[in-house]
Amino acid sequence: MKILSLIIALPLAGALAIGITRNVNLAKKLALVIAAIELLATLIVVQQFNASDSTFQFVEKQTWIPSLNIEYLVGVDGISVLFLPMTALLILIAIIASWHGAQPLSRLHFALLLVLEAATIGVFSALDLILFFLFWELTLPPIFFLIGLWGIGPKRRSAASKYTLFMLFGGVPLLLAIIILAINHATQTNGTLPHDLTFSFQTLLDTPLSDNLQSIVFLLLLMGFAVKAPLVPFHTWLPTVAMEGPTQMTALLTGLKLGVYGILRFAMPLAPSAAIEYSWILGIFGAITLIYGGLIALQQTNLRRLLAYASVSHVGLVIIGIASLNMPGIQGAIFQLFNFTLIASSLMLLAGFIQQRLGSTEILHMGGLAGVMPRLTCFYFLFALAGMGIPGTSGFPAELLLILGALLAHPSLGITALAGAVLSAAYMLSFTRYAFLGPVIQNNVRQSQDLRTRELALLCVPALLIISFGFFPNSVLNINQKTVEVWLARLLDQPALEGDDLASN
Amino acid sequence: MDALVILIPLLPLLAAAAIGGGHLFGILQGEARESVTGDIATFAITLSCLMALTLLGADLLDKNQGAFSVGQWLGSDTLNIRLNFITTGFNVRLAALFSLLLAIISRFSINYLHRETGFYRFFFILSLFAAAMLLLVLSGNAVGTFVGWEIAGLCSYLLIAYSYHRPVATQNATRVFITNRVGDAGFIVGIGLSYAWLDTVNWNALNAATGQLTIGEATGISLCFAIAAFAKSAQLPFTPWLARAMEGPTPSSAAFYGAVMVHSGVYLVCLLEPIFSQSPFAMAVLGLVGFVTAAYSFIVGQTQTDIKSSLTFATSAQLGLMFLECGLGFWQLASWHLCAHAIVRCGLILTAPSLMQHIKANADSQRRLPVWLYIASLQHFWLDQIIDWALVKPIRGLAHDLSYFDDHIIDRMMGVPTPALGTLSSLAQMEEEVIGAKLNNDTDEFARGSGLAGKLTEWAAALVHWFEDRFVLRGIGKDAIHFGRQLGHAANKFEQIILRPRYLVLFVCITFLVAF
């Protein structure tokens, strides 16, 4: 069954079909149908996924560039499988959210969204490093045009170029690390250069790598992924894009945590002993990002900027979980990634709804929204509380696992994570206090409309997901349990490491 | 009989879901539906009260197993968090008492809140709160208790901000919630330490395994839980939140800050009696904090002129006494004190609004305190201000500085600041094409160095040129001295900023974290 290829190809085909149609309305409907089918297909993958098997499933292998041994190799495991329906859901939501938008959208807009969907799903399922890199870079052009052409800020073009330049900059170390890995494989197997290169992830996992090279590869990959994640100090593109880009696009960008996924999937397993050695650097990076993002969020007066910094801060929290290198920490981190995808994009979507109504998400132009738009405020509270990790939402089990993991591994990181939790309540609620509560100040706020039925139905989906995963967290954890066990074992049970331990004893 | 225990928190939760969902989707709205809503909440809470009483009866007749487990809620590695309940002893007694008080308060509120705009919201929050409190006292493991703990705190936030158009109410609500979050952090560390040292989060297993703990470990665990208890039960230094919390409608004040929620701190300490007993230091802290809070509340209570705030300080004084009793080892006394106080305070706060009508003239507020104490008491010993000055302001300042740093330094360093990029020609042209307006911008900015590498080259060239121009060609002249002076100013300014207390404290904190 070639379902993964189908999932990657379907949106591309959809984009082409949209190119042929002449009518914008038809294009819209076509995009909607394709995105819905895509979501169903990804759900089928999750449903057929065998959680007790820790290897890659649905693997498809095809020679692509034989002279360099580059293959078309895709597959999913417990870590990546949930990101597929997540991506499909976000794209579907983005299409529906912009359905009646005030902006004139063209066929190109929907075609680009579908191309982005294909590329993102490709990133989550590619197992050949070159293929991965191709998809990784392929996400850039659609985003560039989506921000540059349909952005809502006056500096949208500058934001689009800023984003693209940042990402291209991040791509360089990635490519370098990939090449080093491939050449190392050739030298380790005593092969000739172009013939014995390999970019297959599974083969490279089994190729031994010297300690020096491991450090270089790990740091290069970390740098590449840190730009996308984003980690401080590479985060400045996110607030800019959040202010200038179209909100449904920003919801996607804050929602899709490609960078952290990259760290988890590639950076750490490919350079296992370096990952252990530098896990403290990762932890410190995470802690700085968490607190830095949180403190700056405390100072923001615009909801979209606030959400951008909150998203930066969340990434820091996830990185702390990954750095703890134990089961609760990693499982919490993956759960939290999944969670923040839902929360951050839903909140950004809400900000978009507010922007459509008031023409601004600046605190000065808001004030007292709760009285005028009780439903919108209700959803805002639900998502904000989930972001703070209040029990009853999926944020709680994820944050609990993550903090327990961090406390067990590095107590100081755990305490920093807790400080971050207090801070997150502070910045969310103090913004809420002025923007949603309090008296109505502006006249146009008084006249604005509460959520329409379509918007209400749209928000109900992530809201229900958040609540149900809060009540039944095991449904998510069971999917990645086995994979994470193997993932951790690969890192922790290294022969070289045990040798070190013996030597130090 | 044990299985009955699930329904006790579940019923109010279902009521909350029904009211919340119904209101959100417009089914429960307007005056006509008020009675239905009130009935749903009261009925659910009364029913769970009856169940709790049945459970209590069964417990008194020795029919209960002592624990009931529904299944695993969360599992990861050796961490196994189950949904389980304790069905005997103090927990059940407290559940019966709390649910009884909550049922009374719920019935009282139907009339009290008639035709209020937030009627539905109130009953949603009250039902949710009832579910949270009953889960808190009945849960068999620390995580379940924490869930109740946190949701009760959230409900308290929502009710303090009940009249959300008033800025004071929202400010107080935010402050109270964040203060409580600090306590919650203590709770989580407590859970983490218990898991790390005893490999369990079940209360019974924890209490049974205390023998394996060293005194140091017992002190660590008990102090963490003590911080959580102090925050929830408004002990020093957290006391000021209680006075702020009286913004909500009276029935909610009765439920949260009179009868039920404030007692959860004492409950937690009583529950962990075996661990606290292991650690003399933790006991001393409990006793001392309780005593100081009682004294503080007594003095501050002397100068309160309205009924709700004097009740507030009476409450925190009584809670202080309970902690003192715990600290001295009179656990039984503390638990009875808790129950008795809950009943009395519930009655007092519920009757407070009508009290004004019963009493004709306010009694003269006699000044029985020495002047300095009087002033201190009026100002609540400046506790709020001290916390503001020591915590809130520095953090705000830090946030402000960082925000500046992010916008002006990091963004410029990492970003692509040239405005040339703003009009990157292809995008602009494409957009013009779409709009149909030919603005015909002749100046093509693309030719200038753009892109990171291009910019870097440009900057490097500029820097070298500047260096060449200033130092090599002109020699060390006036400019260089001027530049040096500017550099000195900048360095001075940097040093000044870095020496501000908030940075010093920050560095000390970081050092501690690194050393830890």
Image (cartoon, coloured by chain):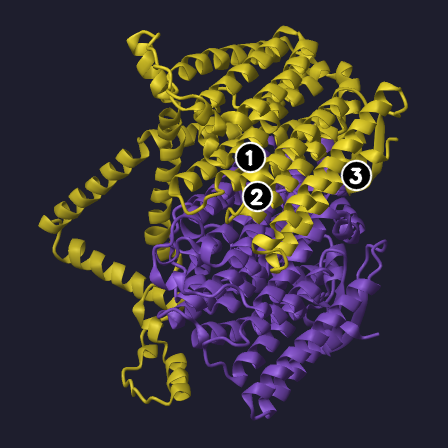
Chain colours: A purple, B yellow
Q: Are marks 2 and 1 in contact (CB under 8 Å)?
A: yes
The residue sitting at 74% across, 32% down in the picture is B49
Amino acid beneath label 1 = Ser
Circle 2 SS class: helix
Residue B247 versus residue A409: which sits nearer the camera? B247
Amino acid beneath label 2 = Phe
Upstream in sequence: badge 2 or badge 1 = 2
Q: Is residue A220 visible?
A: no
Chain where mark 1 sits: B
Circle 3 SS class: helix
The residue sitting at 66% across, 39% down in the picture is A400
Amino acid beneath label 3 = Leu
Using the numbered discs, state the Cα–Cα distance from disc 2 to disc 3 in whole angstroms.
22 Å
At which x and y percent is residue A174? 57, 61
Tag 3: Cα neighbours inside 10 Å, few (<14), some, or many (≥20)?
Answer: some
Quadrant placement of the C terminus of chain B: top right
Relative to A347, is B299 above or below?
A: above
Residue B252 is labelled as: 1
Which residue has dot 3 on it?
Answer: B7
